[in-house]
Amino acid sequence: MMLTRRAMLGAALALPVAARAEQFAGRYEPRAEPIADGLWMVRGADAPIEFGNGGAIANSALIATEAGTVLFDPGVSLTHGQALAALALQVTGIPVARVYVSHLHPDHAFGAAAFDPWIVHALPATRKELERDGEGLSDAMYDLLADWMKGTNLVLPLGDVAAGDATFGGRDFRMFALSGHSGGDLALLDRRTGTLIAGDLVFHDRAPSTPHADLPSWRAALDVLEATPHKLLLPGHGPLDTDHTAITQTRDWLDWIDATLRKAVAGGLSMAEAGDIAIPGRFARLKAARYEWQRSVSHFYPGLEEELLPRLQEIRP
Amino acid sequence: MMRPTIFLAAIAALPASASAQALPADPLDSPMWQYHAERLFAGMPVSFDERVKIEMPIIAENQHAFPVAIDARALPGARRIVLFADLNPIPVALDYRPLAAEPFIATRIKLDQATPVRAAVQLEDGSWHLAGKWIDASGGGCSAPPVSRVRGDWAEHLGEIRGSGWHEGSETRLRISFRHPMDTGLVENIPAYNIDNVTVSRADGTPLARMHVFGSVAEDPAFTVIVDDPARTAFSVSARDTGGLEFSGSLAPATRPVMASLHP
Ligand SMILES: [Zn+2]
């Protein structure tokens, strides 16, 4: 049975108008916490992207330099990026002169719309992924966040970041070109303060998300970060890591989802049932754990079924 | 509960217009409730029933493949399960008949927009028992081309079947998946083309479960059924698509139990 056009029109008329569209008064109010010399953390909400939080769920960093403020991850939308720019000027006294986009995900990347694309830098792999997926991700964000996204055009970073040592405005950084959470994951070590800004390679007390993940590369990237001496770690989501636990926690979660997904497929569970599997108590402090687990089931299950379920012997009539 | 024969005699004696029972108010308040209920349930008694369990994720992470598991094992006499999404352009995804099988079915469907997703379970007496939830989905699950069409390799793998079996008490749980684009006909220049019938039988040919499948089932459709299997036999699976192609395969007897502690 296909629905007739008239039936669908009737349904559309009967649907209640989304009340949220009628009286939009959303405003981003990011706040900066000083965490080290000339370095501030801007905390995202430890939640899924929702209309209620305007999609402001990713952490950002502000780094003061002589040439201007470095903004690591410009937020989710035009007005979010603008709010972060205003915040940067307020706390450092000098405007944003360089924006780094850690990876393609909208909560980290789409606020680039608020900046001159020439000051927005990213890994070449990230630009490629934004070229490939940016439009689709943008549609999904407009769908979910509606008015919060107003005026947010997809801005492709025009500056390339390469791995290795870099200096900006007299401040020395080490740039890491990694992958695993996505096809291009940028991390930055601020040499002056020993702060490792890890993007979404590291989540802290918030379950990691896996829509573009490659788990073996992600683990390899965590090895690199772990082997990099640092005092503080600023994760892509969740609170500042001051005691070297966030990398271990992220790896623990990735190992658990990998093993559990395989067990579920090999053990005969359907995808919907796998989504309801009990999450071990040691992950109780991770926010959005059930939500991210179910997302990961969706990301990996069909591929694992193809890998783990045998082909049937064909019956020839 | 009325015995089926008596019940059928009773409705046969009534004029058609009077036989229709008043529909209960829809707890999901769907704009399409009346429309679908009148067509699907054809005047038989309808109730919303907690014994029908429908298991789905909190959100539609992938609107092209949204997992649903329906379990009506708590309802004695369940003989048919219809899975439908009110606001999908192809609302019914699956019409399942467990012949010598439990009233349990799991699959993945496409969602075209936010919609109620429902399980309707019919008992021997003709009555329908429902459960469902609103699922928030971003658009385009039915109107985007399948991945294998975009990649262009759909024909290479067409009809490949994968699967396995697991003991579940005296029964066997079978998971079966087919490679098939499951074209909805709603994508420009790609006519509707989908698997429309699946039958699971014992190796000796005794049919255990049958389903009618529609274009709103996800690409590379996957199904989980639980069939009677006291003698631990081998199985065969056969499917037909709307192009008249037939796919079939055989499954060895199950040798291992299903994963324990589904629920904490
Ligand atoms: Zn991310």
Image: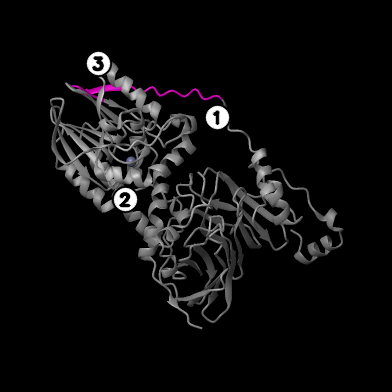
Q: From the image, state whether disc 3 or disc 2 is nearer to you.
A: 3
Q: Is the magenta stretch mostly helix, strand or loop?
A: loop
**Of callouts 2 and 1, the N-terminal one:** 1
Tell me, yes or no, if residue B157 can be seen here. Answer: yes
Q: Where is residue A59 in the image (x, y as percent from the top left)?
A: 31, 31
Label 2 beta carbon less than 8 Å to ligand 1: no
Are there few (<14), some (14-19), or many (20+) residues within 10 Å of tag 3?
few
Residue drawn at point x = 71 percent, y = 43 percent: B25
Type of the residue with mark 1: Ala
Inspect the magenta stretch and tell me whether residue B136 lies in it: no
Residue B232 shows up from this direction: no
Image quadrant where residue A38 sits: top left
What label does residue A21 carry, if any?
1
Counting from the top left corner in percent of width and height, residue A303 is at: 38, 59
| Mark 3, secondary structure of its residue | loop
Tell me if the residue at label 1 has its CB under 8 Å from ligand 1.
no
Q: Does the residue labelled 3 lie within 8 Å of ligand 1?
A: no
N-term-proximal mark, 1 vs 3: 1
SS state under label 2? helix
Q: Mark 2 points at which residue?
A: A256
Chain letter for the residue marked with disc 3 in the picture: A
Q: Which residue was labeled with disc 3?
A: A93
Chain bearing tag 2 is A
Q: What's under tag 2, amino acid-wise?
A: Trp
- Residue A256 lies, with reference to residue A172, above or below; the image says below
Number of numbered discs visible in the structure rendering: 3
> What stretch of residues is rendered in magenta?
A23-40
